[in-house]
Image (cartoon, helix red, strand yellow):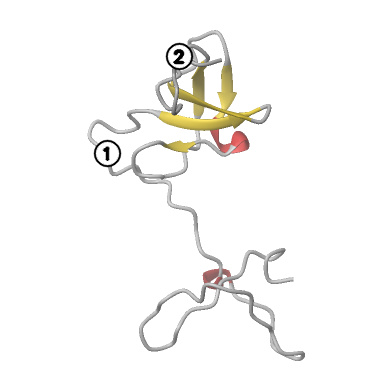
Amino acid sequence: MTRLLELSARCAECAATYPGNFIIEPGTPPPFEWAREPKNTVCSCEPRWPKLMVKLRGQWYLGYPSTDGQLVVNGEAEGAFCDSCGAYFLGDMVVDLDDRSHLDDPDGT
């Protein structure tokens, strides 16, 4: 249930995130909005959003922010993120089907 509600537990003293499953005792009031961990959507790279990573049809692809390209997808809907800092990307992006630089063997098939 805690995964379904996207809840996380934190230490009351040091604020470390509890790494495993946890139980919410019966009768505990529902969580407040601040109890959910927000997604980081602020890219800390210079320049911003150098390369985006997205998984489509079971494969990882690189892309960049734009609406001008052969394959444009909604980054938020597809779970796109910055390949360098991990920030989630919320806009439209072009998927570069030819860029294989993120693969262990870019020349392999």
Could you tell me which residue is drawn at 59 percent across and 75 percent down? 32
> Can you tell which mark lies on residue 2?
none
Judged from the image, the secondary structure of the residue bearing numbered disc 1 is loop
Q: Does 27 sit above or below residue 73?
A: below
* Image mark count: 2
Quadrant assignment, res 35: bottom right
State the quadrant of the C terminus.
top right
State the quadrant of the N terminus.
bottom right
> Can you tell which mark lies on residue 107?
2
> Which residue position holds label 1?
45
Q: Earlier in the sequence, mark 2 or mark 1?
A: 1
Disc number lying in front (2 or 1): 2
Q: CA distance from mark 2 to mark 1?
A: 28 Å
Tag 1: residue type? Cys
Tag 2: residue type? Asp
Judged from the image, the secondary structure of the residue bearing numbered disc 2 is loop
Could you tell me which residue is drawn at 63 percent across and 77 percent down? 31
90 left or right of 77?
left
